[in-house]
Image (cartoon, rainbow, N blue to C red):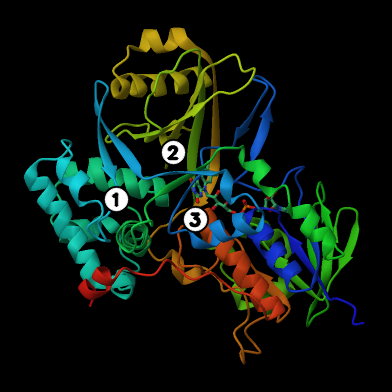
Amino acid sequence: MSVPRTVAIVGGGVAGIAAAVRAAEAGWRVELIETRTKLGGRATSFDDVRSGVELDNCQHVVMGCCTNILDLYDRLGVLGEIDWHETLWFARGAGAADALSIAPLLPAPTHYGPSFLRMRLFSWSEKVAIARAFLAILRMGGRGCLRWKGRTFGEFLAEMRQPARVVEIFWDPVVLSACNLPSATCEAAHALKVFDDGMLAHRFAGAVGVSRVPLGRLYGRVEELIRASGGALRLRTSARALAFDGRRITGVVCDDGIVAAQAVIAAVPPDRLAKLCSDTLRAQDRRLARLESFSFSPILGVHLAFRRRVMSRANLALPGRATHWLFAHEAGGTANFVQRIEAVVSAADAWVGLSEEETTRRVLADMSWALGVSVDELARDLVWSRPVLEKRATFASAPGVDTFRPRAAVEAGDLKGGVANLFLAGEWTDTGWPSTMEGAARSGYAAAAACTGQGGMVADLPRALLVRMLGR
Ligand SMILES: Cc1cc2nc3c(=O)[nH]c(=O)nc-3n(C[C@H](O)[C@H](O)[C@H](O)COP(=O)(O)OP(=O)(O)OC[C@H]3O[C@@H](n4cnc5c(N)ncnc54)[C@H](O)[C@@H]3O)c2cc1C
C-alpha cells in the first residue's frame, strides 16, 4: 500500500479549512496548523465573558451566488444551519421600510422588478437611473465588467449619470457591505461583480444566508475529516517559518517543532505570510514579491441585547446612516434578553478609537431613526452592548488590487516563477472576488486542487437565459 503524502496547511480560517477538507478527500494526509484555540479565523465566534454568550466576531452573511462556501458547508454537514432570506429591507426612517424581494415566479434578471418598482425610497427618476445602470451591467456581461478593472466603481456610476442621492442610499449600502469600501474608492470590477453575479445572473444569487448557530460551530467536523486522513489538527500552534532547502519547501517550522511535508499550503493573510518566508525564498518565488502592497479596511460589529423585541424584520439596511445594517436574532433558552441585534458598520475608519459607550450611543441613535423608537426607550431596554472592531477585517478592494494578488500555484512550465510545492490560499489571493468567505473558500479549493491534482472550484450558478441573451 502506498504511503499517503503529507500536506501541511498553515492557517485554520475558511481558506485553510477549505484546503484541508479537499486535500483530505484527495487522499493526502493533512496537518492543519492554527495559532488560535479555535478554527475559523476572521469568520468565527468567541465566548464573551461579560455577557456569557458565544458571539460572532461580527455578523457574516453569505449569498446564493457563493457556491464554494456553500459547498464547503455542505461537506461539513452544516448547510442546514443557514437561514435564507429572500427579502432585504431598506429603512426610510420612523419605522418605515421598503422591501427588495425575489418575486416567486419571475426569471432573472426581472425577479427584483416588482418590489423595486414599489420602493418608496426612490423617486421615479431615481428608479429609471438605477435601472439604466443595471441594464448597462447586464449588457456588459461578466467579461465586460472585467474591462473596468483598475478604475473605481464611482467612475462607473458617474458614467451612468447616477444622482448623488442614489449613490448614497442604494449603491453605497450594497457596495460597502460586500466590498468594505464606498463606491468612490472601490475597485469597479469587484463592485460590478457583486451586482452582476450577486443580483442579476440568477434568481437565487441575491438570497442572503445567515448562520443560525455561532460561526465557530460550523467547523465542528473539520477535525474528524483531518484525523480520518491520518493527519492532525494542531490548534494553539504557531508557524514560525516555512522550511526551504533552496529548491523546495520541506515543511513548516512551528513553535513546538518541525512539521515535515511534501507540500505546504500557506493560508494566512499576506502580512503573516511575509513573516514566514526567508529573503531567499521570497527572491525565488515571484508570487511573494508584493505581500506588502495590500492595505486593509476595518469593520465594526456591535452586538446589542434587548429585554424586548425591538426589530420585527430579520434585516434592515440604513441608507445614508453611519450604521449600515442591522440583523435581528431571537434569543433562546435561558438568556436574560429577548432579542439580539447585530449592527454592522463597514469601512469603519471613523469609528476607530471611540469608546464603547460612544460607539453604542451612535448605533442607538441610528436604530432610533430606523425603528422609530426613541433613543431613551432603546437605552432603557438595552441589557448589554458589545462592540467588536476588526481593524484589518478585509483587504482593501482598491483599484488595481488584482494586479498583485498571487495565484495559488506556480504556473505550469514557469520553472523560474516560484517554488513548485508551495501553494497559496487566503481570500487575498487571485480569486477575482472581494474579501469574502466565498473568496476564501475558492482560494482553498484552488490550492488543494493544484497540490493534489484533484477536485477544484465549484461552478458558479448558471446565468439565466434572459441574462445571457441581454449580455453581449
Ligand atoms: C468583521 C468582519 C465581517 C465580515 N463580514 C463578512 C461577511 O458578511 N461575508 C463574507 O463573506 N465575509 C465577511 N468577512 C470577510 C471574511 O471573514 C474573510 O474574507 C475570510 O474569513 C478570510 O478567510 P481566510 O481563511 O482567508 O483568512 P483568515 O480568516 O484571516 O484565516 C487565517 C488564519 O491563519 C491563522 N494564522 C495566522 N498566522 C498564523 C501562524 N503564524 N501560524 C498558524 N496560524 C496562523 C489565523 O489565526 C487565522 O485563523 C468579514 C470579516 C470581518 C473581519
Quarter of the rendering occupied by the C terminus: bottom left
Specify the quadrant of the image occupied by residue 38: top right
User: What residue is shown with label 2?
Assistant: 349
Q: CA distance from mark 3 to mark 2?
A: 17 Å
User: What residue is shown with label 1?
Assistant: 104
Is any atom of residue 355 visible in this view?
Answer: no
- Mark 1, secondary structure of its residue: loop
At 50% from the left and 67% from the top, the residue drawn is: 431
User: What residue is shown with label 3?
Assistant: 435
In the image as oriented, which residue stretches furthest toward the front?
Answer: 105
Residue 330: horizontal and vertical position, in percent? 51, 25
Residue 121: horizontal and vertical position, in percent? 18, 36
Quarter of the rendering occupied by the N terminus: bottom right
Q: Amino acid at mark 2?
A: Asp
- Mark 3, secondary structure of its residue: loop
Residue 134: horizontal and vertical position, in percent? 21, 59
At 37% from the left and 36% from the top, the residue drawn is: 324
